[in-house]
Each structure stands twice: as structure tokens, then as C-alpha cells.
Amino acid sequence: MALRDAILAALLDGEASGYDLTKAFDSSVANFWMATPQQLYRELDRMAAAGLITARLVEQDRRPNKHLYSLTAAGRAQLAGFTAAAPKPGAIREDLMVAIQAVDGGDADAVAAAVAARLQLSETKLANYQRRRRDLLDGRDEDTFLAEAPRVGPYLNLLRGVSFERENIAWFRRVLTVLDRRAGQPVPGETGAALL
Amino acid sequence: MALRDAILAALLDGEASGYDLTKAFDSSVANFWMATPQQLYRELDRMAAAGLITARLVEQDRRPNKHLYSLTAAGRAQLAGFTAAAPKPGAIREDLMVAIQAVDGGDADAVAAAVAARLQLSETKLANYQRRRRDLLDGRDEDTFLAEAPRVGPYLNLLRGVSFERENIAWFRRVLTVLDRRAGQPVPGETGAALL
DNA sequence: AGCCGCATGTAACTTGTTACATGATTTC
DNA sequence: GAAATCATGTAACAAGTTACATGCGGCT
């Protein structure tokens, strides 16, 4: 149950509400795990019941009240245990790649449109990661930061996010070029059949 | 249900048994979707019942009999429909990144060991992808291949696999360097506390 | 007037995981 | 003689998704 550990890891940054975590684990922002709001609220309840986190009720005037969760000693211990264990392989969950695998027998224009949309998203995400990286570095160069920062994990994951989105962008552009060229000049066999 | 479409996409390469697909969707090989054997056998049953694929029983002497599945017209139509629809966002499911996020409060040596193991895996996977790419190109240069090949989807996904694993390797090395330097020269605060 | 953000949930459902079982054959 | 490969499954469980609901406050 990596979701549980991902939440604990997120709470290393300080207390957060379910709603805060919802935003942090959203696919448009997340850089080390993703989850839906429903998953988070359910899991937070269980974790609180298990004593891994504690809830603090914050009453608000012009907003609904909220629970701010923070790590307990048991939560920190659980997370340390997680880092000590061998991680599971990690899966590819990318519908777009399935569509690309099947593009030759499918709707190439629709796939190209989806790729173009993702290209935009990746550019946004890359810009966000780089801003967060600058915020973390806070004027220092990387070596200085790595020497004096209390935590390097989030920074390392940010580096991976940056290179991941950069490669995505390059690949999406390549895919668009290839699909475009094919749309203009379809394969002989296909054209023949289509024209009959 | 992208698994269903991923299976259909895999069957574009020709008929396959559940066991064949098991190997193709294994995390050590897969480059566009992953699934466990149990998922595949269950889904193949459902797909055959739904008429998306047909099973052909192949009786064998020295091996257990097997079912070879192939696409039906309905299956091809379903897959074409999938390519025409907007793909879902796609999720990060990577325990290792959770461990890295939490590395500063956890077992840094264990995380480094896990990263080193992944580095090996990525090198193997990269070599496999590049071999498969050479096999697909079959002596032709990329432009020639892209012009005359009946399918470009699998090739495009292979390109992405290559760059993905290359970036993984570079990142893993970086993580190892950083964790190593930290192990040698821990953060003042931590050291002090640990030595008390 | 209507939508967005805050903040949380319930219920029903679909996917994915883990553990186990079978039994012959081939490779170390 | 033991392990791996081939080829398939069952059963039980955990995780993830989708649809919907609530109600106030602020923005346009």
C-alpha cells in the first residue's frame, strides 16, 4: 500500500488537510505519486484510526472547517520501514501509449490531437517543476543546496520530474511529426484499399 | 479499461496465448502497458465472451494445450474506438519515488541499494529496447522505415522506452552520487542527534 | 444568476494483487 | 534431483475509479 506511504511522505512537509493533499496528488501537479480525492479521504481515515497520523480540527469562519493531519511517531516509523523495504517494480499506466501502439489501425488524427494536448500539459508541468526547483534552491547553487539542505528527497524527485517532462515533450513532438507525415502521404497498401 | 485495449493492441502483432501475453506484459519487458498473468487470463475470458477475440485451441504433444487468441472485427472496431477517444491522464505508480521522497527520514542505505538494483534493470531494459529497435528497422534507416512500414505505433513506443530508460539511468546515477556524498558527510543536525 | 473554490464525504463498482494449485517436460 | 518452463487457472483480498451529494462564500 504505497498510497499510505506516499501520504506519510507528503506530510513530512508539514501538516495538511485532505483537500491540500487532493491538490498535491492531482495528476496535473504530482511528481511522485497520484491519487484521487476519494482515495485520499478514505485512506486518511484509516491512517488516523491506525494511529499513523493525528487530526487537528481547525474551525474557520468563511470556509468549511477542516482537519489538519500530521505525522505521529508511529507514522514516521512506518515510513522509515517503507524506505528500508525493497520497492515494488512500478507500473506503466498510460492510456496514450496504448493508443499510439494501436494508431495504425485506429484514428490517427484523434491520437495526434491527444498527443498535442499532452504536449501542452507537459510544458506546463515542466515550467511548474522548474519554478519549484528554483524555490527550493533559493539562490544557492545545487552543490551548496545538497550539502546544507535538511532534505534532498523532494529535490531529487523534482530533477526526475524535469527530465521526465522534457523527454515527454521531445517524444510528443517526434510523434506529431511522424503522424503528420503519414497523414499527408499514407502507406501504399492502405491507400489502395481505401480508394477501392 | 485500458487493459482490454492494451491486449487488443498486442494482438495486432498476431495471435497469442495467455502465456505469450503474460511475458509481453511483464514489467521487465513491457513498453506500453503492464499486467499480471491473473489479470490477463481473466480479461481474455471476458473478451472472448464479449466477442472481441476468438480462441483457437492448439493441441500439443509435449506441452500443455493452449488457446491462441486473435482479433475479431468487433475487437478491431473496439480498438479503433479507443484510439478515437480522449485518453485518461495516466498515473505515476512508482514505489521507488515514494521511498526517495522520504529518504531523509528513512533508511538511506536501503534506498541507495534499491536504486542501484533499478539501475541494473534499466540498463537491461534499454539494451532490449535497442535490440528490438534494430530488429524493427531491419537495416533500413529511420526515415525509410517510417515511410514504408505498415505500422509505426510500436516503433514510436520503442523510441519512448529508449529515452525513458536512458533518463532513468542518468537519474539513478545522480541519486546514488547524492546519497553517497550525504552518507559520507551527514547533515550537522542529524549527526549531532545520532551521536548523542 | 451561475459557476468556481473550499472541504468533506457515501455508495457502488471495476481493477489490480497475492497466494496457491496442477502437472508434464526440459535444463542445470 | 532440483529448478525452470509451459500453460492455465481459482479464490480472496486490496486498491482505484466514477458518480453523486452537501452547503457556504466569493467572483463575474
Image: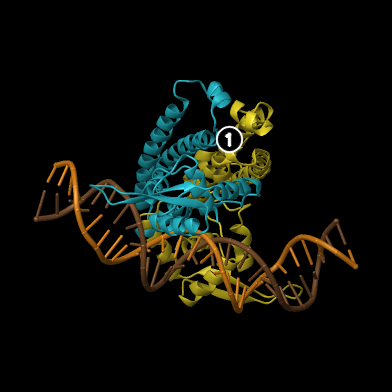
Chain colours: A cyan, B yellow, C brown, D orange
Q: Position of residue B192 (x, y in %)?
A: 64, 28
**Residue extending furthest toward the front:** B196
Residue at 46% over, 57% down: A43
Residue at 47% over, 39% down: A13
Q: Position of residue C9 (x, y in %)?
A: 36, 62
Secondary structure beneath disc 1?
Answer: helix
Asked whether residue B112 is in view, the answer is: yes
Q: Is residue A58 left or right of residue B191?
A: left
Residue at 64% over, 66% down: B19
Q: Which of the pair B126/A101 is nearer the observer?
A: B126
Q: Which residue is mark 1?
A: B171
Asked whether residue A106 is in view, the answer is: no
Amino acid under disc 1: Trp
Chain to which the residue tagged by mark 1 belongs: B
Q: Is residue B119 left or right of residue B92?
A: right
Q: Which of the pair D25/B56 is nearer the observer?
A: D25
Q: Residues within 10 Å of mark 1 (few under 14, many from 20)?
A: many
Q: Position of residue B127 (x, y in %)?
A: 65, 42
